Amino acid sequence: MPILALDTSSAVAVAVLSDDARDVLAAASSAQPRRHAELLAPMITATLAEAGVDRRALTAIVAGTGPAPFTGLRVGLVTARTFGLALGVPVWGVPSLDALAAGAVAGAAPGTRVVAVSDARRREVYWAAYEAAPGGLTALAGPDIAAPAELRASGRLDGALVVGRGALLHATTLGLAGEPTVLDPDPADLARLAVARAAAGQPLPTEPLYLRRPDAEPHAGAKRVLT
């Protein structure tokens, strides 16, 4: 039975896959990072229709947990949880940077190092470092947030494959030549990681990775008004 996977950490992206996550039945994406709430639900409906899958046939929902800016990430996770609750199926969370790295090292030799870099806005990036291993990825460091110059100075990019939209936006500061081979997480990679981790009994929490406090917060000195 099919799996629905979605990610709103960067682009708005949706995929419907077979239950083992090997076959992609349908997929769609839109690189409009400020229109998550507007685009996601219609994209899910259209992708399910293209795949010929009734939503009631879904057996699991997979969502990227970031890191990402607050609003877009919240849209994806709330949507995934709502679907899971309504359908009575599990909701699995996978860090979006994991999927970004997995897409980059597919077919790479074991030991290949990759750094996934996404846009954190405010002239900062989210990043995480990995190493290709037989059958998967080994996490080396992160996820974390840094100014591009700080990430370059850390030496983590030296000799590594660097991917992600953050790498494209800050290529000069990061000291990169050429465009990254992968820009955004593929929800199909999210699903494949989720299925493998679930089979191994690993936790798949859906708590969001913000790494930064929300822009809008109650003022610390606000007074309560009693009526």
Image (cartoon, rainbow, N blue to C red):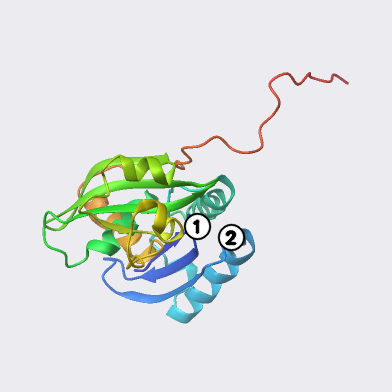
Q: Which label number is shown at residue 65? A: none
x and y percentages locating residue 125 in the rendered image: 44, 47
Determine the CA span between mark 1 and mark 2.
7 Å
What amino acid is labelled 2 in the image? Answer: His
Task: Kindly state the secondary structure of the residue where label 2 is placed.
Answer: helix
* Residue 61 visible: no
Q: In the image, what residue occupies the spot 35% across and 43% down?
A: 151
Task: Kindly state the secondary structure of the residue where label 1 is placed.
Answer: loop
Q: In the image, what residue occupies the spot 59% across and 38% down?
A: 214
Query: Vertically, is 136 above or below 211?
Result: below
Answer with mark 1 or mark 2, whichever residue precedes in sequence. 1
Residue nearest the viewer, comparing 201 with 86: 201
Query: Vertically, is 15 above or below 215?
Result: below
What amino acid is labelled 1 in the image? Answer: Thr
The residue labelled by disc 2 is 36
The residue labelled by disc 1 is 8
x and y percentages locating residue 202 in the rendered image: 25, 44
Which quadrant holds the N terminus?
Answer: bottom left
